[in-house]
Amino acid sequence: MNQQLNILLIGQGGRESALAWKILGSPRIGTLYTAPGYYPGAIQATGLALDDFEAVAEFVERHAIDITLVGPTEYMMSGLVDYLLEQDMTVIGPPSGTAVLETSKEQAKDFMTENIIPTPRCMSVTQDTVAEGLAFMDSRRPPYVLKADGLSRGCGVWLIDNLADAKDMLADMLDGRFGEASETVLIEDFVEGRECSVFAALDGENYLMLTPAQDYKRLFNGNRGPNTAGMGAYSPVGWADPAFLEKVERRIVIPTVNALRERGELYRGFLYLGIKNDGGEPVLLEYNVRLGDPEAQVILPRMESDILDLLEAMAEGTLGDYKTVWSPQTCVGVVVAGAGYPSGPMQTEAVDGLEEAEATGCLVFPDDLTKDATGRIVTSGGRVVTLVGVGGNLATAAATAFEGAERIRLDNKHFRTDIGTPESD
Ligand code: GLY
């Protein structure tokens, strides 16, 4: 590939903000184009309709894009990645056939079971098999884990202590609480222990372990309240020591990569593994076929290597010879969310204070922000911005992140005040 690379980054969330920031920091970047997101320093491909695959391919051709980097899963499932691959274009992001590892919890579970990857026992239930599902629940111990089969913006997993409540929730989910996503529901055994997000980069043949992150999925302090797509994160993860990560690699990552290779689909992209520590033994809860959000916001600032070298190695199938270097610094990311998140409704609101937050020493990674007709920065709701503090330890990094979060001005904003603190353990 060329020394200077032109990149098209697809997506618009906090993860893509962090990717854009990291890519723009590379001495190898030629031009960074983004769609649909807007990031200072990049050229926003305004008017590029991402559901018009021919238009995207034409854009890639016209702007001499070397690599198209796809952040969110929706553009893998839409067929965009498949189409660009068919045109022999270089894409980081797996095809739709492999993205089902994230978009169908049921198919992911079958894949794990077939490949003898440690994962909690579960039963998959539909309206037709609800009686069997209820009987299965009677035979299990609380808390009961219910997972919508399909994508539901990080909100489709429920942990319920009481059997009667869990049965009501099962009925509610099968009745369409999450639309089509919960037409099938998995009832899974709960596993005690700490959970972290482990990442690998894949080039179609080889893999490279990246640094893990600790995600906070619950809405409220003390890990209470409903699940969200993530209210904060930190990296590195002290308890996920090299011996534990070696087990994750040997028992989970290697069998996964081998099985993907055997399926014959080209998977050049990031793989996210939701891992529980069950008494020192790793078990796999879920796959995602992308970097995490807000995990990307705390791992990318720790990447000392040039991200374009990594993307190039992923694109060219040379990851086997490539190593990333990680800073020993700690990053803590705090997500500021808008009113009503995660249950919605999403609404457009003005956001101020981004520059003041940056002045505290934070990295500021906006999520789906745009400018309105009057030039004000507005959010479409949900998660609004991740503030990342970088420091010598969790306490100093968290203090900076909280200071940044305080500076954000948004009606009815909320954020967790225990990310990275001992109270959240
Ligand atoms: N933070 C969880 C996710 O990205 O799915």
Image (cartoon, grey):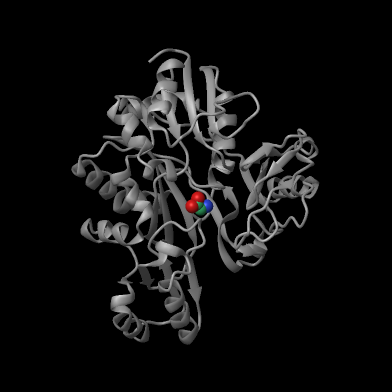
| Quarter containing the N terminus | top left
Please tell me whether residue 393 is drawn above or below residue 65 in the rendered image: below
Asked if one can make out residue 301 in the rendered structure from this viewpoint, the answer is no
Q: Quadrant of residue 217?
A: bottom right
Query: Which residue of the protein is positioned furthest toward the top in this rendering?
Result: 3
Please tell me whether residue 401 is drawn above or below residue 149 in the rendered image: above
| Quarter containing the C terminus | bottom right
Q: Is residue 329 left or right of residue 371?
A: left
Asked if one can make out residue 67 in the rendered structure from this viewpoint, the answer is yes
Q: Residue 294 in the image: x percent, y percent?
A: 57, 47
Q: Residue 238 in the image: x percent, y percent?
A: 54, 52
Q: Residue 214 in the image: x percent, y percent?
A: 54, 53
Tell me what residue is drawn at x 77 percent, y 50 percent.
410
In the foreground, 66 or 3: 66
Q: Residue 98 in the image: x percent, y percent?
A: 30, 46
In the foreground, 342 or 271: 342
Q: Quadrant of residue 192?
A: bottom left
Tell me what residue is drawn at x 41 percent, y 30 percent.
323
Tell me what residue is drawn at x 35 percent, y 83 percent.
134
Q: Is residue 186 left or right of residue 404?
A: left
Q: Is residue 380 left or right of residue 136?
A: right
Query: How many marks can you see?
Result: 0
Please tell me whether residue 22 is drawn above or below residue 344 in the rendered image: above
